[in-house]
Image (tube, rainbow, N blue to C red):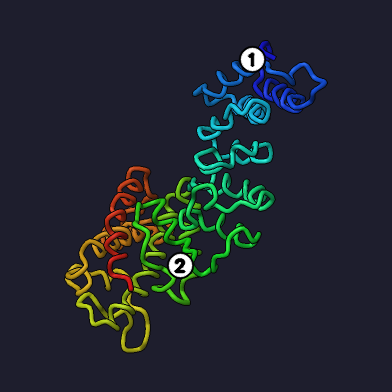
Amino acid sequence: MKSSPYSYVRGEAWHVLARYRGDARSRVHGRPTSLTQLAITIAKSKSNDSFAERWGVCHFLCVSEQQTLAHHSRFLRFRRVCSRALLAPVLPSSAFAKGEVVQAFLQRTAIEPGLSVCSALHQLGLTPRAIGIRNSLLPSQVLNTLNELGVTALPASTVDPIAEMLESRYDTPLGKSWRTLLSTQYVHALGLLRQAESAFAAGRSFWLITQNAFNQTIFLALQRHLGKTGHLGACRTTNKHGELIDFGVTLDANGPFSQHCPAVANCFRDVNSRRNRLPQAHPYHKKTAAQSTHLSARERAELVRKPRVAYASFAQLMP
């Protein structure tokens, strides 16, 4: 096993050892100290080129925990999202105690580890609270799955994926309900935000287009609320014919919204302005006739930094 140059071969060898670890007839059933120590050394390694081997190693350590109660499954806290999900079926029962690795699975922003243990929680008759996690801390997809399995009893309407995604990407504080603000437009806004998130890494320009569309959707919903409450930041969003006024016009620097809600307006104006200078929106600049350009990584980083303040301020204006 040590001599193989291929990590996937070494990983498969560890899977075989794991399968025989609990077999009393095998030589690895007892207390194979040397193998366990080798497995721990590999699990602690920070190398990124041996996924297959570490998967097999962690499989071996999870099975070993059932024999030794040595909490080897804790090494999974530091593994990739994919490997955590793959190892969920072999987690020892001790991993489901408070403070153990399943708690870390459920608290991750990435949903795969949490989803991977939903079935086990159902089979063991455990709730998230039993292992030290409040339902409000679970990703919505995990919470919905547990609710469908009967592990939790939480109305689906209390789940707010928009709040979760904004908190994850922009550190927007959780609290106000986006469902309350958006009402019947919630699903439409959620779809736009999900498209933006899916394109964040691979399609920067498309991310900007859909993020800007999301901004306009929540802006219109907020204006309906501000208009009803008589807020000074309320502005006209339709003309005398009932047609929508251009988003950029409603964000005019001299308009009421910009004057009374500058943190939000300035950010939304910058995002909308850059969106208008994308080739997908306009191939040439209207005033200069210069070619439009795709969004650069540096520009995206700047456009992510600004909403961290803007969305927090926006939430304060929500009902």
Viewer-side residue, 91 vs 12: 91
Question: Which is in the foreground here, disc 1 or disc 2?
Answer: 1
* Residue type of the residue flagged with mark 2: Ala
Q: Which residue corresponds to mark 2? A: 189
Indicate whether 141 appears above or below 318: above
Viewer-side residue, 202 vs 172: 172
Question: Can residue 21 be seen at all in this image of the molecule?
Answer: yes
Q: Residue at x 68, y 36 (%)?
A: 90
Q: Position of residue 157 (x, y in %)?
A: 51, 70
Query: Dividing the picture into quarters, in which one does residue 41 lie?
Result: top right
Q: Position of residue 233 (x, y in %)?
A: 22, 74
* Residue type of the residue flagged with mark 1: Thr
Label disc, if present, on residue 33 of the rendered structure: 1
Sort mark 1 into few (<14), some (14-19) or many (20+) by Cα contacts within 10 Å.
few
Residue projecting furthest to the right: 25
Element on which disc 2 rests: helix
